[in-house]
């Protein structure tokens, strides 16, 4: 079965300086409201996460590892439905605001790829919205 590469990108601008937003993002997945299961550990420059999402009557879980760079966090799914999925969080400061962009890359057959793309686009939008809310409420 031939696999196709899928890419999804979304971003948000947060009215807060880059160090504040970057530090808040290290609390992923704890601030994400749609996750029914969330666990994370941060050891030096590496984040290990386990998350789950309930869809109808069942829960989908996956695990991943994140590597922390200067203005980027790069997650790779190590178990679950999309093993090998790469999620890159990119942080750019613009006039005391921070733009957070999440780029998702994964390979899947065409039919399942589009289904996962719809699900992932929803999850990424929720992550960005919840990160923005978390930062703005934390700042006050």
Image (cartoon, rainbow, N blue to C red):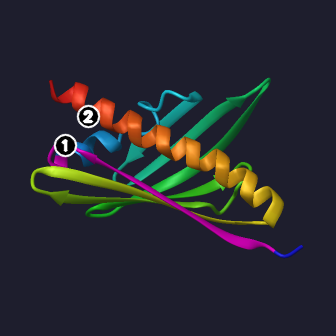
Residue displayed at 44% across by 31% down: 30
Name the side, left or right, on which 96 lies relative to 48: left
Q: Residues within 10 Å of mark 2 (few under 14, many from 20)?
A: many
Confirm or deny contact between disc 2 and disc 1 (CB under 8 A).
Answer: yes
Name the side, left or right, on which 72 lies relative to 113: left
Residue 35 percent location from the top left of the image: 57, 30
- Find out whether residue 117 is within the magenta segment: no
Return the residue nearer the eye: 119 or 23: 119
Return the residue nearer the eye: 7 or 87: 7
Up/down of 96 relative to 60, above or below: below
Magenta-drawn segment = 3-19
* Quarter of the image that includes the N terminus: bottom right
Residue 90 percent location from the top left of the image: 35, 60
Name the element at disc 2.
helix
Q: Residues within 10 Å of mark 1 (few under 14, many from 20)?
A: some
Residue displayed at 35% across by 43% down: 26
Q: Which residue is mark 2?
A: 135
Report, in whole angstroms, how far the alpha carbon at label 2 lies from the one at label 1. 7 Å
Residue 69 lies in quadrant: bottom left
Disc 2 or 1, which lies upstream in sequence? Answer: 1
Q: Which residue is mark 1?
A: 20
Residue 2 percent location from the top left of the image: 84, 76
Up/down of 76 relative to 123, above or below: below
- Find out whether residue 14 is within the magenta segment: yes
* Quarter of the image that includes the C terminus: top left
Residue displayed at 57% across by 42% down: 122
Residue 75 percent location from the top left of the image: 50, 57
């Amino acid at each position: 079965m031939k696999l196709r590469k899928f890419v999804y990108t979304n971003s948000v601008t947060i009215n807060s300086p880059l160090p504040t937003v970057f530090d808040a993002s290290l609390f992923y997945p704890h601030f994400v409201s749609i996750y029914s299961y969330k666990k994370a550990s941060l050891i030096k420059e590496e984040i290990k996460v386990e998350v789950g999402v309930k869809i109808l009557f069942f829960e989908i879980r996956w695990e991943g590892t994140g590597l922390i760079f200067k203005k980027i966090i790069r997650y790779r799914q190590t178990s679950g439905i999309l093993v090998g999925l790469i999620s890159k969080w990119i942080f750019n400061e613009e006039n005391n605001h921070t733009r957070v962009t999440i780029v998702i890359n994964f390979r899947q057959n065409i039919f399942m790829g589009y289904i996962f793309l719809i699900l992932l686009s929803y999850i990424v939008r929720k992550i960005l919205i919840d990160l923005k809310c978390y930062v703005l409420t934390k700042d006050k």
